[in-house]
Image: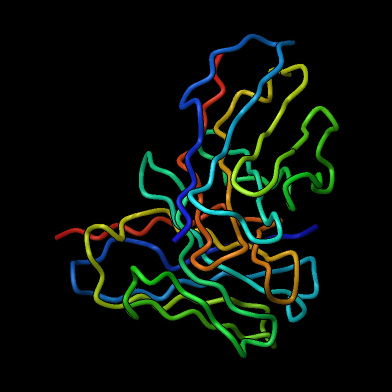
């Protein structure tokens, strides 16, 4: 059974940083692209970033302007999202999502339950 | 950026009825790379359809997807009580991979 368990969310002040993690199990993690998708409270879904199976290529939403960095550790079946210079508008549930392929195209066949990030003073 | 528009915003229906949800793109979706997801309150989204018309693993055949180019449709033929939820479309042919605002299928 595919399982994706996010952690690392919480309350952070504007301008602060957080590192999210996603522990994966139940599938060959190193063979699949992975992504982060976020959802502001009561709002729709927003793609954040994706990474290929090997980690050799990454893609991110332009709106993030380089503040977020996706990475992975295939030896530990773990996905990361380093978030810097956080703003109030980054407040959202952050979902870890498994890609259906090793790379492009990026649709998501399994999702974690999400971790809440709240940016507030 | 490809903007997706979903209609209607809310679709009031009863169990057993047919639901037809629309997703329109601001420009043609490359290779018909269009997916549909279902989300229930407090839960993560679940993949229903990919490639505009292919059902994901374990999805009942009452869910079907169609369309191409800029116009796509998700049809639920005979609503079950567990189908009342919010449905999002996503295009993944062109980065950034954008989602529509969602359609709520309501009782």
Q: Is residue B78 left or right of residue A113?
A: right
| B95 up-or-down from B13: above or below | below
Left or right, A89 with respect to B39, comes to left
Give B51 or A17, whichever is nearer the viewer.
B51
Quarter of the image containing the N terminus of chain A? bottom right
Image position of A65 with respect to A112: above or below: below
Total labels: the figure holds 0
Query: Which picture quadrant has residue A109?
Result: bottom right
Tell which of B33 and A76 is nearer to you: B33
Left or right: where B70 falls relative to A42 = right
Could you say where residue A49 lies in the image, as x and y percent from the top left?
50, 71
Q: Is residue B5 left or right of residue B70?
A: left
The image position of residue B52, as x and y in percent, is: 72, 47
Image spot of residue B56 (x, y percent): 79, 48
Q: What sort of colour scheme is used for the picture?
A: rainbow
Q: Residue at x 38, y 72 (%)?
A: A62
Q: Position of residue A19 (x, y in %)?
A: 41, 76
What's the residue at 68%, 33% (across, down)?
Answer: B74
Q: Residue at x 73, y 68 (%)?
A: A25
Q: Taking B17 as reference, is B64 above or below it?
A: below
On-image quarter of the C terminus of chain A: bottom left
């Amino acid at each position: 059974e595919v399982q994706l368990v996010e952690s690392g969310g919480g309350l952070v002040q504007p301008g602060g940083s957080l590192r999210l993690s996603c522990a994966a199990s139940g599938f060959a993690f190193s063979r699949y692209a992975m992504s982060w998708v976020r959802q502001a409270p009561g709002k729709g879904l927003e793609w954040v970033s994706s990474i290929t199976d090997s980690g050799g290529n990454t893609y991110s939403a332009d709106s993030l302007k380089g503040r977020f960095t996706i990475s992975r550790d295939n030896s530990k079946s773990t996905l990361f999202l380093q978030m810097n210079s956080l703003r109030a508008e980054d407040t959202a549930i952050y979902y870890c999502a498994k890609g259906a392929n090793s790379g492009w195209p990026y649709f998501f066949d399994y999702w974690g339950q999400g971790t809440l990030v709240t940016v507030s003073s | 950026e490809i903007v997706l528009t979903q209609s209607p915003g809310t679709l009031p229906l009863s169990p057993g009825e047919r639901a037809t949800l629309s997703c329109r793109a601001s420009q043609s979706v490359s290779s018909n790379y269009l997916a549909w997801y279902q989300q229930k309150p407090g839960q993560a989204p679940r993949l229903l359809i990919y490639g505009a018309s292919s059902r994901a693993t374990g999805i009942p055949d009452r869910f079907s997807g169609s369309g191409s180019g800029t116009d796509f449709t998700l049809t639920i033929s005979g609503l079950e009580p567990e189908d009342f939820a919010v449905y999002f479309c996503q295009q993944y042919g062109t980065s950034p991979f954008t989602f529509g605002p969602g359609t709520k299928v309501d009782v």
